[in-house]
Image (cartoon, rainbow, N blue to C red):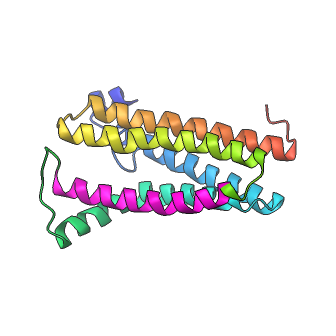
Amino acid sequence: MNMYGVIERNNLYFIEDDNSYSEVFQYIKELWIFLILIFIAVKKKIFPYVIWSLLFLYLLFDDSLSLHENIGEYLSNYFEIQSGLGIRSVDFGELIVSFSVGISFTFFLVLGYLKSNKTIKKVFQHLSIFILLLAFFGVFIDILHVFFNDNNKLGLFEDGGEMIVMSIILAYVFNLLDKNFNLQLV
């Protein structure tokens, strides 16, 4: 589809463009993950899942409304952050936002983890690995993309990697739903 966008010059097919078909599909996956986790949390009274669901709700809002980009740009202007190391000032602002949000969620997730039983802790471990993979693509590869001023290859790797990881997370939470309610989805 990304190649079709290049050939036909239709931005709706570009994997990197906001509000493209692939980005909207990503928003739908994030929404489903949020809804499934909040449903399990409420029905099974598993409060720590609320924290995870809110993280995915944040990711949905961040992706669809460009929160870390907009706030990062504001911070870079407000604090007059200078470019350096081949990274733009706005990217430093985005990193500040991403790390601040990440640390905040990590604090609450650790609290939830410590208060959970063995089964829930296993889910936390799996979701944590998925989030680290997502951060690898969304933060590390994104910075490389900017650093090397690469327009296509790293951007495709970054967004494609994020989309694959989010698809795996969605499959995982659908499996959680099935296990918790014996829906026999598969």
Q: Position of residue 94 (x, y in %)?
A: 30, 57
From the image, give the main secondary structure of the stretch colored magenta: helix
Q: Position of residue 148 (x, y in %)?
A: 18, 35
Asked whether, in this view, residue 94 is left or right of residue 124, the answer is left
Residue 66 in sight in this render? no
Residue closest to the eye, 80 or 159? 80
Residue 46 in sight in this render? yes
Q: What is the total number of numbered labels drawn onto the structure image? A: 0
Residue at 18 percent across and 71 percent down: it is: 79
Asked whether, in this view, residue 174 is left or right of residue 31, the answer is right
In magenta, the rendered stretch is: 88-113
Quadrant where the image shows the N terminus: top left
In the rendered view, tell whether residue 136 sits above or below residue 18: above
Q: Residue furthest right?
A: 182
Does 109 appear in magenta?
yes
Residue at 57 percent across and 46 percent down: it is: 29
Q: Residue furthest bottom?
A: 78
In the rendered view, tell whether residue 98 sits above or below residue 176: below
Asked whether, in this view, residue 18 is left or right of residue 87, the answer is right
* Residue 44, picture quadrant: bottom right
Q: Position of residue 93 (x, y in %)?
A: 26, 60
* Residue 66, picture quadrant: bottom left
Residue closest to the eye, 62 or 2? 62
* Residue 177, picture quadrant: top right
Residue at 39 percent across and 43 percent down: it is: 138
In the rendered view, tell whether residue 80 sits above or below residue 129: below
Q: Position of residue 145 (x, y in %)?
A: 25, 38
